[in-house]
Amino acid sequence: MKPILRQALPLTALIAATAISIAPSARAEVPATCVKGVDLATLGPKSIVGQGPHGEKAASPEVLALSDADAAKVKEKHFKVGISMQTVNLDWSQLQIQGITDTLKKYGVTVTGVASAEYQVDKQIADIENTIQQHPDGIISIPVDFTATAPTYKKIAQAGIKLVLMDSIPTGLKHPEEYAAMVSADSQGNGQIAAQILASCVAQGGTIGLVNFGVDYFSTNERTKGVREWMKKNRPDIKMKQVDFTDPPKVSQIAGDFLTGNPDIKGLFAVWDQPALDTLSSMRAQGIDIPVTTVDLGLQSAIEIAKGGPLKATGSQRPYDQGVAEALAMMNALLGKETPAWIGVQSLPVTQSNVLESYKTVFKKEPPPELADACSKAKPACN
């Protein structure tokens, strides 16, 4: 997901910033063995490692499965559910919506509409209030701003409507009184994947940089936390430096200045895939070739990984699967069942060797020609 002020970005990007022109300085330091020593079978956590925003233990989406009897009850009720998104102009958002609508349709639940706030707080407040007036049985939503929109989200429960949240909980909302569940990726687990790959590319005693989202937001905080904690536990020899950004279109400038001021950096972690791509633009402008890892998978980041360039790997969310879990959580809530406060969706490691398979897993479709072509040109390293 993507923020404006307090929101973290999802699967794909805001608009990529224009790379700055800086006199190139040769810094080609990617080891030939980079990534090759990492076993995909053991890469990343095998269960949810993070906790929820309030320290909740993760529940698996499996606990939301409907029995035949419960499925029949849902179909009999002809429930109606509205969806309020921060935007619909992202692969991440579209896959979430697809997962929700496909699942609800299977059980005879009608989606009354999908509102898109386009990152505007006032518009999302109006969207939610309009949806309440339509008297749905439930609303599934991701907040644009978890503080400014909180009073409006409280109105949902007051109207007797069930609420399921994506990735963030508006300030002050209580479970289960005011929301049924929050569903998100295991962001800390995805950060661990990025850390493990990056560590394989950095020599003993090396220094890495963290290009971090400098806004207090749960999912992005968890990603950087995952990197830091994995490095401290498994590679304490690696030094870490951090630069923060709050305005995503300025990442190219910020990352470029960071690299110029810290020539000792031998690898980078960027907090989601678009800042990683913008960082690559700055690196290329300066003639720098160091390994980069990130979180989330979009088409352009998949292509970069397939090529075998500086972007080595990502820990990906599974937005369609998150949508399925959100729909199931909603139907459980509509049946009067208490659902877990936080439901975590398993992280997915993506490297050059499994990028085509991973694309299918995330996007639920065959890779497009441009990704397939990039992978074909990089065989046998790419699938």
Image (cartoon, helix red, strand yellow):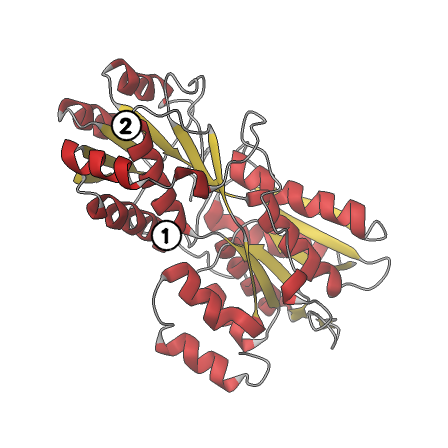
Q: Position of residue 297 (x, y in %)?
A: 47, 59
Q: Position of residue 294 (x, y in %)?
A: 58, 56
Sequence-earlier tag: 1 or 2: 1
Q: Nearer the viewer, residue 314 or 262?
A: 314
Q: Nearer the viewer, residue 260 or 371?
A: 371
* SS at mark 1 in the image: helix
In front: label 1 or label 2:
2
In the rendered view of the protein, which quadrant contains the N terminus?
Answer: top left
In the image, taking residue 293 as reference, residue 300 lies left or right, namely left
The residue sitting at 34% across, 48% down in the picture is 96
The residue sitting at 65% across, 60% down in the picture is 43
The answer to whether 161 is drawn above or below residue 38 in the figure is above
Badge 1: residue crowd in 10 Å (few <14, some 14–19, many ≥20): many
The residue sitting at 46% across, 27% down in the picture is 341
- The residue beneath circle 2 is 335
Q: Position of residue 229 (x, y in %)?
A: 72, 43
Q: Quadrant of residue 223?
A: top right
In the image, which disc is placed on residue 168?
Answer: none
- The residue beneath circle 1 is 320
Badge 2: residue crowd in 10 Å (few <14, some 14–19, many ≥20): few
Q: Nearer the viewer, residue 271 or 153?
A: 153
The answer to whether 245 is drawn above or below residue 373 in the figure is above
Tell me the amino acid under the disc marked 1. Tyr
Q: Nearer the viewer, residue 187 or 245?
A: 187
The residue sitting at 54% across, 71% down in the picture is 354
- Spatial distance from mark 1 to mark 2, Cα to Cα? 23 Å
Instruction: Decide if residue 374 is in sight here.
Output: yes
Q: Position of residue 349 (x, y in %)?
A: 57, 60
Q: Quadrant of residue 30?
A: bottom right
Task: Please report contact status of discs 1 and 2: CB closer than 8 Å, yes or no.
Answer: no
